[in-house]
Image: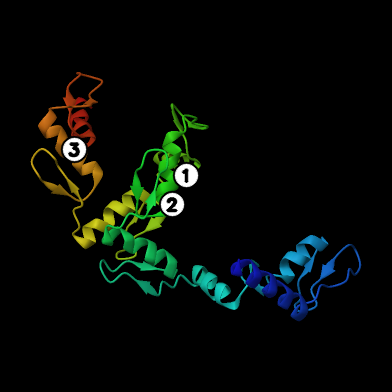
Amino acid sequence: GFGFIFSLSLLCEQRQSHPESEQTGEGMYPCNQCSLTFRTERHLRWHVHRPHVCTQCMKSFYSSGALRQHLLIHSGEKPYICDVCGRQFGREGTLKEHQLIHSGDKLFTCKQCGKTCARKGDLKTHMVSHCEERPYSCCTKSFKLLAKLKRHERVHTGETPYQCDLCPKHFGLQSLRNHHLNHTGEKPYECKECGKLVNNKSNLNKHIRLHTGLKPFECNVCMSSFITVCSQRAHRVKHQ
């Protein structure tokens, strides 16, 4: 209704204040309002309706506010701070999404199984679990999501591209999320067997093995088995 009418009137206003340019020489379409030129009229029209241009990467935006928000990516500035755990964000929307983790609100529901998620992105990731296809492969593993393939590839490359905004350490994405809990002191994972609280799912799984006796990590030399991969690695040194 009104959203469409507003968008249409805004588009007309932009066309009047930022008219399309005429083609000049060598198939180039210059913008009358700035120094940029474009190879096709379609690209020029796209630019005309997004007149605010970042001079660092040439991305364009509908409003000056959106451009200012984008510029924070280049400056590294993170002015939005979570008042619960101190994490900093470049976008207000990202901060609000993050704060749902602390509030416990789960606003997004999977229509397939009823699972609820705090963030829309988490719901999208979850919904892929209902799909059987795993189109992304590496070594002996396959993945439903390209993002999970890229995360797995860091096992081979050793890449740790994400820096903690509270200390200088670098991690993979999931490890960074777990690491942040060290700063906040948060322990959201509870053992149903004994009630012990731990700060990440990996540590919960390790703890549960103390109850189950499961030792999934085996030494390929003497066939001894261990609860954690760290224990397995420490043991293998004895054979060297």
Q: Is residue 45 above or below residue 223?
A: below
Q: Nearer the viewer, mark 2 or mark 3?
A: 2
Point out which mark residue 222 bears. Answer: none
How far from the left and from the top, in percent, is residue 185?
A: 18, 59
In percent of width and height, residue 87 lies at 32, 66
Spatial CA span between label 1 and label 2: 12 Å
At mark 1, the secondary structure is helix
Q: Mark 2 or mark 3: which comes first in sequence?
A: 2
Q: In the current view of this chain or complex, which residue is farthest to the left?
A: 194
Which numbered disc, 1 or 2, marks the residue closer to the eye?
Answer: 2
Q: Tell me which corner region of the image, top left, top right, bottom left or bottom right, holds residue 81.
A: bottom left
Question: In the structure shown, which secondary structural element does the residue marked by tag 2 occupy?
Answer: helix
Q: Is residue 90 visible?
A: no
Inspect the image, locate mark 2, and give the three-letter code of the amino acid beneath it.
Gly
Q: Which amino acid type is marked by label 1?
A: Ala
> Residue drawn 88% across and 62% down?
27
Q: Quadrant of the N terminus?
A: bottom right
Q: Residue at x 24, y 42 (%)?
A: 202
- Could you tell me the amino acid type at mark 3? Lys
Residue 99 visible in the snapshot = yes
Residue 121 tag number = 2
Q: Is residue 20 above or below residue 104?
A: below
Q: Is residue 91 left or right of residue 18?
A: left
**Which disc number belongs to residue 147?**
1
Marks 2 and 3, how far apart in space? 27 Å
Q: Nearer the viewer, residue 49 or 26?
A: 49
